[in-house]
Amino acid sequence: MHPILKMVSQRLALGLLLLLAASALIFAGTQILPGDVAQSILGQSATPEALANLRRELGLNEPALSRYFSWLGNAVTGDLGTALTNGQDIATSMGKRLGNTLFLAFWAAVVSVPLAIFLGLLAVRYKDRWPDKLISGVTLTAISIPEFLIGYVLMYFIGVKLGWAPSVAMINDTMSLGQKLSTIALPVAVLTLVVLAHMMRMTRAAILNVMQSAYIETAELKGLSSFQVIARHAFPNAIAPIVNVVMLNLAYLVVGVVVVEVVFVYPGMGQYLVDHVAKRDVPVVQACGLVFAAVYILLNMVADIVSILANPRLRHPK
Amino acid sequence: MSDPLLKVRGLKIGATVYPADAKPHSIEIVHGVDFDLAKGKVLGLIGESGAGKSTIGLSALGYGRGSVEITGGEVWVNGRDILKGGISGLRDLRGAEVTYVAQSAAASFNPAKKIMDQVVEASISQGKFTRAEAEDKARVLFAKLGLPDPDNIGSRYPHQVSGGQLQRCMTALALCPEPDLVIFDEPTTALDVTTQIDVLAAIKEAIRDTGVAAIYITHDLAVVAQVSDEIMVLKMGEMVEYGTVDQIINSPQEDYTKALVSVRSIEHEEKKPTAPILSAKNITARYKGTKFDVLHDVSVDISPGQTLAIVGESGSGKSTLARVITGLLPPKAGEIDFAGRKLTPDQPSRSIEDLRELQMIYQMADVAMNPRQTVGTIIGRPLEFYFGMKGEEKQKRIQELLDEIEMGEGFIDRYPAELSGGQKQRVCIARALAAKPKLIICDEVTSALDPLVADGILKLLLDLQKREDVAYLFITHDLATVRAIADSIAVMLQGKVVRYGTKSEVLSPPFDDYTDLLLSSVPEMKLGWLENVLATRKMESAGN
Amino acid sequence: MFKNIPISALIGLFFTGLYFFVAIFAPWIAPYGMAEAVGDVWEPSSSEHWLGTDSIGRDLLSRMIYGGRTTIFIATAATILSFTLGSVLGLTAAVIGGWVDQAISRFVDLIMSIPSLIFALVVLSVMPVTIPVLIIVMGLLDSTRVYRLSRAVAVDINVMDYVEAATLRGEGRKWIIFREILPNALSPLVAEMGLRFIFAVLFVSTLSFLGLGVQPPNADWGGIVKENKDGIVYGIPAALVPAFAIATLAISVNLVADWVLARTTSLKGGRD
């Protein structure tokens, strides 16, 4: 077998294994912890009957392992169970919200990825001069600020004081794409700022690493123009690390979405998860946790596979 | 008479340094150098690390590496001052009139592109040849440089060919646009000695056939003597001496040049073998998780107070033997006797006495010393650990040891980072001596050092052997070092000892093929050595 | 001693020190009580209430001071926990190697394959949300990062010739860990400790902001943001005050950590 095929399939298998293990961990996190889950859900004042009912409903009387496998089996076939609080089917309620979250994350990525790469290139171009220092100063600040601060600052100044964009981002199906986009302008801006810092910093490091290679010197000593050096020699080698950076940050973005959705009251997965954590609705929390973990693991896997595919040593074995 | 091809006047080069505890500032690394190079001639630049030889070489391309900048002077190529033409003038020059061969071809080739595309790139983008013409030229050069399968090697990727082959490809890359001048920057330094001679010969032949002028940069005077017409000796950014090869090699004027010429001429009278202090018997070893043996049935003896040199190229298993003897890699088969005792195969189970009497010195002194410990702690710890010395007594002994390694007062409280390369290696020697060992394993201890410094270390080791009666197991790839220090020699190839005996036995004919190849490949500081060797080899192969 | 400290690090040290000082002496510094309603809803700043009042008329400055105490206490405790656990396990794994290393490392990979915030939310959905639980959950989740760093640093040092030289001398594991590896690993680990502290501050603030951290009437900075966030749409900036405090604390610590890390590149022995 071609070594690259072998490595990619190994990585895919590892991703699946990781997902399986993560599902077990999420399940274990909610089920096998010390103390009685039903008790902690209902609180100290719960009546014994209510406790017994809840235990039956959660299937707590069965052994944990068999509960896990039936939960996992159902999840694989798309059945995520029903919510404790309102008895609705979780998969149905989650479907639209997942769509909304991906919509938000997609537009945040559309804005932030090109911007981050552009600024990263700018920082490299003016390395150790003021644009680079400014950019790294801003990044240092940005990674120290909680998402919700950026959210409220933008909301307060742009949404409330200036009135340029809606302060809350309630979207629904009747809106046109344009209306939707203007509604999510602020959350997209916040998410962009949140991932921009990391992405730019990592892009800068990735490009610098390539630009300091001896083969770039060789190219310069061939009398090539800056553009030729970058396009022919730097770019083919920088693409893999940059794609890697982008993927890792998209994974980060998926998590950032949770807080931003709460700030802007956006009807997505994050809001859904946080609401049901507060209500201690375990099946919903498990389902959401599983979906978030799956997206996160998937993006990390894509990042690794891109690096494998881009490695000339693997693509053209001896 | 026409202008020389290259004319350098008052060249000054500066660099910005970023010390950790001070503001960045500029320093001058080349302080005004003048020289000429005529068409078709080869100039050798020689000096130790920090002499500024690479920096001067690159100035012919108007290039400064990193924060290095040409701060003054003139560099004339083909009748124009390249420093005045701006970057676009330099781009016309680079890759067309002047080209460059770097030390590490492996790093200098773009890993993502085929060799041929990179070899012809400069010719095409400089408008010298069409792609088809350039590729034809490249194939001719590949053949001339002795590359296998010259018609197809260009379609491979850099990682698909060996280091020696890639270095030849780099030479082809530099020669392909038919430049007037090529800068060779230590092109053979990273290669094994038997590979070096072939690459060196290929480069020399290519230079002669194409009539190109060249600057050949190296720290090895014997190498540069083979390819150059003239030699410039540099020290700390200044020219020490300039002359023809013959004059520099045979009648050097300056003390520094004399020292460089007489390097590796240490004489050492061979001692007769006696009852061995260490005897390794039938050692076979492999690394965990691998499927092949790195050592096959190796047996060597070391006499007390004498030196056994293990010679071999990279991958010969010589360092592995050291790991087996120290117990870091327990062998698959075989045993080791040391000072009349049997050594257990793995280090943790050895007695303190065994550990004390068997010490080790490493190639890279930098990483062999904890950067957070002072010289006093580094040398003092074995005294404390093995002999329980404390306070006054320990301090006194540390100073004695420092005196022994010729470092004297004032070093006890210094950190390794504050020492020079040679001083670091001396401290490592003192640390080994502190244990009062019977045998010291020296693993390539002089390879990372400049020749003059390395000579100092070898002399010190010989002195210490006389005084302390300690035996050395000296691992090296450098035969000149072996001649200087060994009493007996084991030549290793692919995990086997191919030749073993006293120095005079091993170094006298009749030779086996490999020892012959190895011995004849070591550059000698003689004019015409390369031609003689090649002619002899050709005759031999014709005779067969 | 202060001669070679860059100005940015000095600013960082000053503000970090200030915040910790205020946190420790909160009861003596705060002008009003934590839960005392002393004015109207969302009064603007005045000489009595420097930062105004909050959503139910409590003095915002006093609440900020007490809130800072809670935030810093939780973050410090979580950092100590994550740091001790992570670095001890990391160094041990690097020095012992073999299956011990494999087992811990693969388990850490697994934990890190789920985003920390999501994992914390999942666990907090069934645990009683109390300060000790918060500290333990945050500390354990974050120890995975400390583990990775300390293991990587230790593995790098462990292959150095000076460690081999000590092994060959016959030194025991204790000497190797504490005298050869630890002194060289200290600076990156200290810098990492700063970053972990920031992470803990942001993490606990985020949880409280989501309503899943410190529970009322007690509050940390994230909780104060939550209490006052409804004012934002009416143009009342009270929620921005704690958010600003979180950011300045994080930036100050970051400046200090950056400086510690930059210093490690200078290997001029251990005497500075």
Image (tube, coloured by chain):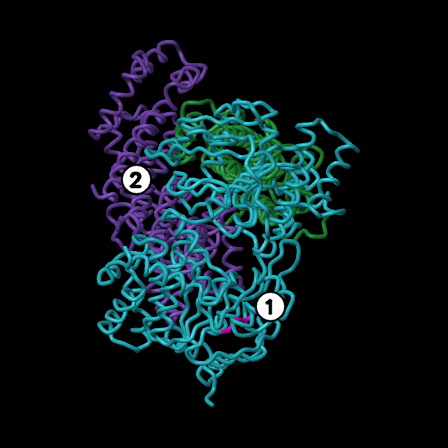
B413, above or below B236, in the image: above
- Is B129 or B526 nearer to us in this picture? B526
| Magenta span includes B233 | yes
Quadrant placement of the C terminus of chain C: top right
Mark 1, residue position: B237
Q: Are marks 1 and 2 in contact (CB under 8 Å)?
A: no
Colour green, chain = C
Colour purple, chain = A
Q: Say which element carries label 1.
A: loop
Would residue C45 be seen by someone viewing this image from the given angle?
Answer: no
C-alpha span from label 1 to label 2: 56 Å
Amino acid type at image mark 1? Gly
Q: Residue at x 39, y 52 (%)?
A: B517
Mark 2, residue position: A298
Colour cyan, chain = B
B504, above or below B13, in the image: above
**Where on the picture, by quarter, is residue A223?**
bottom left
Q: Residue B346 bears which disc, if any?
A: none
Q: Nearer the viewer, mark 1 or mark 2?
A: 1
> Disc 1 sits on a residue from what chain?
B
- Is C7 or B351 nearer to us in this picture? B351
Q: Which residues are magenta?
A: B230-234
- Is B328 or C220 nearer to us in this picture? B328
Residue B497: horizontal and vertical position, in percent? Answer: 41, 39
Few, some or many C-alpha atoms within 10 Å of disc 1 (few <14, some 14-19, many ≥20)?
Answer: many
> Disc 2 sits on a residue from what chain?
A
Amino acid type at image mark 2? Leu
Residue A236: horizontal and vertical position, in percent? Answer: 32, 58
